[in-house]
Amino acid sequence: MDLLQRAGELFASGRVHDALEVAQAACDRAPKDAEAWWLLGRVCRHAAMPTASDDAFRRAAALGDRFAVPYRVPPERFLALIDEARTALTGDARRRLESTAIRTQPVPTVEQIRGGVDPDALTLRERVPRDVLVLFQVNHENRSGSEDALRALVRRSLTRA
């Protein structure tokens, strides 16, 4: 099994520190592989290593056209983008979310990942004991290269919830 695939499997199973070690080895073995650097960036974020994460994301973006450096915002700005998106929802989407509490979290926790949540998930809907929609800020940012892209992705996440 190749290192990149193994790192992805470890990451998806919640074994973040093991995934970090293997993803780093994949980058060492193939330093021009944008996909390896992108995975390392995602794993580093989950391992609470934001500087290493940003370095890996920049490296991936420099190596591959399909990757953009993630656009980061403070938590307050992310909440404001959610409020903007919620206000702009169509009637049907607004009704689906009217009794839903919305909260944010940087990334899924290890426990959530081990419980089946994708580590790159944008949202998580929890219906017990109360209907809650969790938006994962870092995962939204990882897929957005600008504030406009982040705004659109937050809007899409709320619309699909």
Image: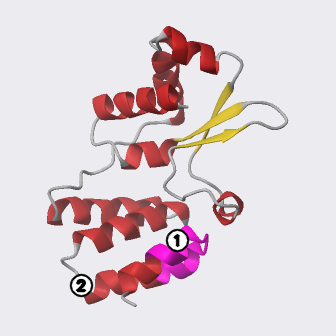
Callout 2: 10 Å neighbours few (<14), some, many (20+)? some
Q: Going 46% across and 12% down the picture, which residue do you hit? A: 90
Q: Is residue 49 above or below residue 76?
A: below
Callout 1: 10 Å neighbours few (<14), some, many (20+)? many
Q: Is residue 74 above or below residue 89?
A: below
> What secondary structure do most residues of the magenta stretch adopt?
helix
Give the secondary structure at mark 2: loop
User: Which one is in front in this view, the residue at disc 2 or the one at disc 1?
Assistant: 1
| The disc label shown at residue 127, or none | none
| Residue 58: image location, x then y, percent | 26, 60
In this view, the residue in front, 98 or 36, is 98
In this view, the residue in front, 161 or 76, is 161
| Disc 2 residue type (three-letter) | Ala
Q: Quadrant of residue 14?
A: bottom right
Find the distance from the CA under tag 2 to the CA under tag 1. Answer: 19 Å
| Residue 111: image location, x then y, percent | 71, 62
Q: Quadrant of residue 136?
A: top right
| The disc label shown at residue 30, or none | 2
